[in-house]
Each structure stands twice: as C-alpha cells, then as structure tokens.
Amino acid sequence: MGKVSVSELIKRFDLKLVSGAEGINREITVSDISRPGLEMAGYFTYYPAERLQLLGKTELTFFLELDSNERFKRTDQLCAPETPCIIISRNIEVPEEFIVSSNNKGVPILSSNKQTTKLSSLLTNYLEAKLAPMTAVHGVLVDIYGVGVLLTGDSGVGKSETALELVKRGHRLVADDSVEIRKMSETELVGSAPELIKHLLEIRGLGIIDVMTLFGAGAVRSYKKVSLSIHLEIWDPKKMYDRVGLEERHTSLVDTNIPQLVLPVRPGRNLAVIVEVAAMNFRLKNMGIHTAQQFSDRLNQTLTTRRDMDI
C-alpha cells in the first residue's frame, strides 16, 4: 500500500497552504475522504481522523453560527494527531479558529478554488490510484488493439524486441523492463511505467531508445488495464505445447487472476505477429467467438456422424 504526502497533494491540485506548514510532510494512507458535518455539530464519537478532511460552504456556514468557544472546541478536535490535512473548497476565507488550531497542532489547512463535489471526486480518484495495492513485474506492457498485453519471460528472451516490432506495427508501449501494476478494483489491474523509465525501451546491442521521440506521441500511453499475460520461454522440445487453444491458463497478480498464454520462442518465429494475433483472438473470445471450441465441437460432431454411419 502506497502513501501520498500533503506536499504531493498541494503540487498535484495547485492548493494553497493557509496554515500548519509544520505538517506539510504528513502522509495520507487511506483514499476515503471525510466531510465532517456531524463533527461540526459536536459529534466526534466516530470521527475518522485518519482521513483527509474536506470542508465546503455548508459545513463552514454552520460553523460560523457557533459561538467562539464552541468553534475552538471543534477545530481543536478536528486537528487530531492522525489527521493528514484539512482542505477548504471554493476559496472560502478560512476562519481564524482553524488557523490557530492548525498551527498549534501542526495540521495543514489547504485552500482550493474548486467546487466541493468536484474536488471530492478528483481527490478520491487520485488517492485511489496512488494508494491501490501495487506490485512491480519484470516484463513489458503493450496496448494491442485496446488489449493490455503483459509480456513476461526470462531476461534476454526477446520481450523488448517484440515490443519494438509491435510499436512499428502501430501499437503502443506502456512500460518496458519494469511494470508497476495496481489493483484498482476486485477484477481490474492497471499497469504503468516507473517515472524514471517512462517511454523508454532497452534493446540489447542498441541501448536505450525513447519510443515517443522516435515514433511519436501515438506510440506510447501512460497506463493501461492489464487484460492478458503472455509468457515467453525458450522452446523446449520435450515439452508439450497447446496446439488447439482449448487449454485455459491463468496467472495471479496482486491477488487477481488474469488469462495467460505460454509462447515458445525459437529462431524463425515472428513473435510480434503471434502476440498481435493472440490479442485479437482474446478480443474475439470476449465477444463470444471461441474458434478452438467451435473446431472441437465440429470435430466431435463429425466423429459422431461417422460412427453412426458405420453402425
């Protein structure tokens, strides 16, 4: 599970630091956002202090109707030791009680010019993406006809070269060498490249190339849902490989199963074309067209018919 510092949030959403600068490096560890309406009324029994606190026009209008002593009580309780920060929307002027409590407790008060509902949505989406369970996988992620294909295999098996050929064929590179995969929901995995190697591809004997500079902005994308894993391995003549396509394999990433194919690699095989066709075939299966199953059904029907004729 990741973490997001308050300073990162300030830069990302162009927020203004009003007070509590001492706590600018506090960390946000949960994606849920709290709008403390009940807390403004004095009910703190179930106050989710570890969440980012977002205040809008409704909460502050009620707050300003309280007497001065009650206001200080509320702000002191809102600025709990676990509270990462408090954000006030619509560029509303921050009441003095908030500033005093914020500076005393070291809890940053931030101001935004955005509407409360819109800001809440933006913050939630950002935090869910940054704080989602994540793992790093040695491989290459390519967007092929809208299908996010993760290429894995031993070092030197040809993953990057295959990705380069796919880019030349009009597909888009997401990440090479290291793919950061985040679990966005129970069934959805999204892959991206670490910032340091974004848009870069390493080709042995050639070195590191910038795919976006060489092939244009249309040859890369920042992230992509991982739908299919293709494992490349050196051809083993003693091993039986699936020749029909009825075998269903899966691999687990961040506690989520995704379909996997195993492709044997040997001289003369055009891996880029095979991977491209695998992605198209995957799309067909999702549309209900399972060629291997249809062939198997026709074969069984033919054998049944011949057996009946022999009888």
Image (cartoon, rainbow, N blue to C red):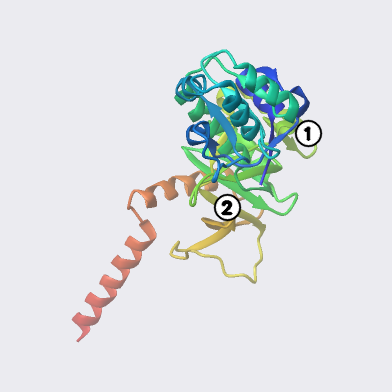
Q: Position of residue 282 (x, y in %)?
A: 44, 50
Residue drawn at point x = 58 percent, y = 32 percent: 53
Question: Mark 1: few, some, or many residues within 10 Å (few <14, many ≥20)?
Answer: few
Q: Please state which of residues 19 and 210 is positioned toward the viewer in this rendering.
A: 19
How far separated are the C-alphas under marks 2 and 1?
A: 25 Å
The amino acid pointed to by label 2 is Ile
Mark 1 lies on a secondary structure that is loop
Does residue 84 sit above or below 158 in this rendering? above
Residue drawn at point x = 55 percent, y = 41 percent: 44
Mark 2 lies on a secondary structure that is strand
Q: Position of residue 141 (x, y in %)?
A: 61, 42
**Position of residue 8 in the picture relative to residue 288 (left or right):** right
Query: Which residue lies under the disc numbered 2?
Result: 230
Q: Residue furthest bottom?
A: 311
**Position of residue 282 in the picture relative to residue 49 (left or right):** left
Question: Mark 2: few, some, or many residues within 10 Å (few <14, many ≥20)?
Answer: many
Whether residues under marks 2 and 1 lie with C-beta atoms below 8 angstroms apart, the answer is: no
Label 2 or label 1, whichever lies nearer to me, is 2
Q: Position of residue 211 (x, y in %)?
A: 66, 27
Query: Which residue lies under the disc numbered 1?
Result: 206
Look at the image and tell me whether residue 166 can be seen: no
Q: Please state which of residues 34 and 153 is positioned toward the viewer in this rendering.
A: 34
Label 2 or label 1, whichever comes before in sequence order: 1
**Position of residue 128 in the picture relative to residue 235 (left or right):** left
All told, the count of numbered labels is 2
Q: Position of residue 302 (x, y in %)?
A: 27, 71
Quarter of the picture containing the C terminus is: bottom left
Does residue 277 sit above or below 74 in this rendering? below
- Mark on residue 217? none
The amino acid pointed to by label 1 is Leu
